[in-house]
Structures are given as C-alpha cells and as structure tokens.
Image (spheres, rainbow, N blue to C red):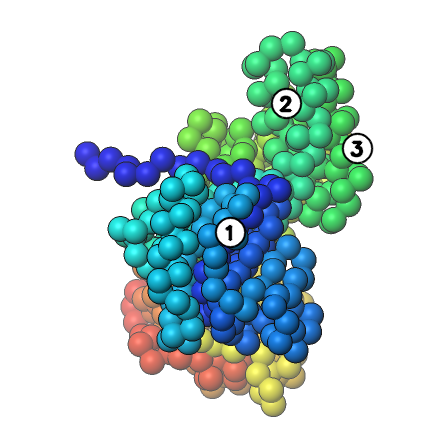
Amino acid sequence: MARLTTFPVSFKVGGKKIIIVGGGGEALAKARLAAKTAAEVHLFAPRISREITAEFTANTTAKSAASSTVSSVTLHYRSAAVADLENAALVFVAADDAEADEAADGADVELVVRAARQRGIPVNVVDRPEECDFYTPAIVERAPLTVAVTSEGDAPVLARVVRARIEAILPRHLGALARIAGGLRERVFSVLRNGDERRHFFEALIDSGPVDRALEAGDGNEARRAAAGLLDAHAVGATGEGFVWLIGAGPGAEDLLTLRAQRILQSADVIVHDALVPEAVVEMGRRDAERISVGKTKGRHSVSQAKINSTLLVLARQGKRVARLKGGDPMVFGRAGEEIAALRRAGIGYAVVPGVTAALAAAADTATPLTLRGVSSGVVFATAHGAGDRELGHWAALAEAGITLGIYMGKTVAGRVSGQLIAHGMDPDLAVGIVVNAGRDGRRTWRGTLGELGGNHAAFANGPALIFIGEAVRAGDWENAAALAPSESELVA
C-alpha cells in the first residue's frame, strides 16, 4: 500500500513573515494565497509584473520607490537578502517566468534558500518538488475552517480540480458557522456534562435549520441567537422537534442533484423518498440514515398522501431531521403543497430545496428552446392525467397563441388528449417531441406532429414521459429521435 511522504499540518504564521522570491505569475499566485493569512507577506524581485503591482499597490507609480505596501503585502523591488529572513515562517521561491528569471540574481536566491534552511525555515521551490521542504496544498478557505488538498507535488492540477469540487459543495457561510461554534465553546463545556452531549450539540448546530437559514440570509445576529437557543435546549434535555426538508431530486441523474440537496442528504436522519427517485440518489444520503420508501406509481399507489403526511409529522416530532426526497422539483406536480400544509398545521419547521424538473431536463436533452423570439412567447407545464374538456380547450387556445406546452403524465391518455386538442382547433401539423427518462443515460426521444400522436404507437418506453407541443419544438435537436408512426402497439402504462 502506498504511504504518504508528507505529514499534513497547519503552520502558525500570525505575527510572522512569509517571504516570496519572484515577480511573475507564480509569485502572484503565492501572494494571493499568503495574503489571506495574518502573516506579513514580503515579495522580492528587481522587476515585478504589472499584475502584481496593480493588485497589491494602490499607486502603480510606486515602482520607483524601494518598496510599497498595501494591506499585509509588501513589494520590494530588489533581490531578497539573508537579513530579510528575520522572523520568517515560510519561504517561497516563485521566479517562474522569463522576466522574473532574468531579473532575479540566481546566486542571491541560492544564498537566501541556504540561509533559510540553516535557520530551520521551510522552503518551497515552485514546480520543483524535489527541492521543496513542504508543498502548498490547494485550499478551500472558509476561515477559520480550511480544507487542504495536496498530491505531494505529483499532480497539482488534480489537487486543484478536487479543491474546486469541494469548494462547490461547502456553503460560503461555513466559516461564520465555525466562528459561532468557537464562540459557544466555553459555554458548551460549562453546561453540557460529557463528551457525547457536547458532540450531539455540535452536530445539531451544524445541521440546524434556523441557524443555517439565518446565515444564508446574512443575518449573523439571528444565527447567534438561534445557536444560543439550541444550546439552552440541549442543556435542559429539550432539543425540540425535528425539521423537514422537501428536496427536489431532479430527473434522476446524480450529477443533476443540487449541491444544497447533497449537503442536506448528508445530514438527514431519515430519507423519505418517492418511487421515481433512483436508488443511486437515495444512497447519496448518510450511510446510517433510515430510508423510507413511499413510492407512488401509475396504477399502484402503495402509500396514500395522507399516510405520507402522517409519516413526516411522526418523524419530525421524534426530533428527526427528515429529507423528503421527490423526483424533479417538489413544487411542480410533486404534491409539496399538501405536505407543507400538514407541516404548517402541526407547527413543524420546513424548507424547500428546488430541483431540476423533468421538462427542463427534457429541453436540455434535446436543445429545445421552450421560449423562442418570434415563435413562442411562453411555456406552460400541465398534467394530462385527469385533464377535462375545459383544461384541454384552454391549452389549445394557449398553443394557438404561440405558447409551448410541456405535458406531464400523459402516456396513457396521449391519444385521447391529442384528438381533443385537435377538436378544440389545434393544428394537427403542430410539432410534437417526446422525451422518456429525461436527464438520464437511458433517455429515449421521438418527434412528429400532433396528428401522429393520436394513433396507437410504440413511442412510450417504460419510464416517465414529457411531451412538448408547439412550433418552438422544431428548433430543437431531434435529429436522433425516432419518428412517431402509427402502429398496432398499445401504449405502455
């Protein structure tokens, strides 16, 4: 098994100096990183790039001076000297580009590096791992919280890619939450008796809905009040009721789940999920979280809506953090309104996390502009299931006015619906596009006209279907879509 050749640590640099030798692009990158610390940053080079000068000096004419300082970065227009190492914590040699290489005195640099090592000051030589005493990790900064990713100098680009992915997952207000936790630390130790109680409190603080929402809104005072109230509840053993998140799981592809949804799934005690949510998405939750399937599919309603509402209330009253995971977006044909009403009546806290609804995933799959200047001025999402003559007449009028229709749950009634729309005056030659399993690897597509939709055909494979109707559909990329063609096949339920 491969072993690490470095030991990851965090250096204390507050009140000390960080020395950067070089005046080009690499020096700029190191200066930006070092400037985020509480250290005094000193950059040395006889010639310093315009980018560095513009970023770290208020007056670019300062080049004529011996040095210039803005914030904690001081630019020195000369080579570094041994005397500059006094009170230094780290040294970076970052003379990477031609200008800096020509300007820097190689002998002086070697002298400074040798002197630094004699004084026990670690040195990093950019792009020369074999000459480095330490490596600079790719950093996700949420001060005072820091996440560092390093490849021990072997693959710095890979480390930066991993850092970017972590950066996207962690909320911006995580540092503020860490400061709140630090501010409560002394009181936590005084009112909570043992390590388990303290651990449970900090876990609850990290996942607290009220604290999280206040921080997202930028209200630090309210976040601190909510955190203090949470600590009071833990101190008397009354941690209160749980919280319910109604989360849109998107069309089914794991990488279309939002970052917020991923974060909440990782903190939920229970995941209550629908049948259309793939197992791979459910498995993105905490490993020890309870899973409850309340799947409802066409023709087989395994759990009533009333039972789902009751389940959410029972779990929340047990103090559980509940992720109610729905396919697509919870507010689009997801019956979220009924669940929210039940939670409101019970006085239980909740929040909605949006997801990518099927129509938007289908439009992306086929590059179909649902609104198109001069063709379609709007789009209407509707469900064909249970649609009556009045609704169909309304849809026909909208389509005639240039509105694109996005029809959900229309597989078993497509033939009837198309016939009635035509009867209400819609053009049989109006473009139709169908996407089954939108947003997933196994998606299938068909194209044709409203008149062709009326016959029995094999257009509907197993899986949820989205039907687009309107002239804007012709502007999409349906090149690889199968043609709608009448057949003797029955529609798949």
Give the label, 3 or 1, closer to the camera.
1
Q: Residue furthest top?
A: 193
Q: Is residue 474 above or below residue 437?
A: below
Whole-Å distance between the Cαs marked 3 and 2? 15 Å
Residue 485 can be seen in this image: no
Residue highlighted by disc 1: 83
Whole-Å distance between the Cαs marked 3 and 1? 50 Å
Q: Residues within 10 Å of mark 3 (few under 14, many from 20)?
A: some
Residue highlighted by disc 2: 201
- Image quarter where the C terminus lies is bottom left
Q: 462 and 201: which one is in front?
A: 201
Would you identify the image quadrant in which residue 213 lies? top right
Which secondary structure lies at badge 2? Answer: helix
Q: Is residue 52 above or below residue 184?
A: below
Q: Earlier in the sequence, mark 3 or mark 2?
A: 2
Q: Amino acid at mark 1?
A: Ala
Q: Amino acid at mark 3?
A: Arg
In the rendered image, residue 58, in percent from the top left (x then y), is placed at 69, 70
Residue 89 can be seen in this image: yes
Q: Is residue 160 above or below residue 279?
A: below
Q: Residues within 10 Å of mark 2 (few under 14, many from 20)?
A: many
Which secondary structure lies at badge 1? Answer: helix
Residue highlighted by disc 3: 225
Q: Earlier in the sequence, mark 3 or mark 1?
A: 1
Q: Is residue 216 left or right of residue 381?
A: right
The reply to whether dot 2 and dot 1 touch (C-beta < 8 Å) is: no
Residue under the image location 41 percent in, 68 percent down = 104
In the rendered image, residue 472, in percent from the top left (x then y), is placed at 52, 82
Q: Residues within 10 Å of mark 1 (few under 14, many from 20)?
A: few
Q: Earlier in the sequence, mark 2 or mark 1?
A: 1
Residue under the image location 48 percent in, 59 percent down = 80
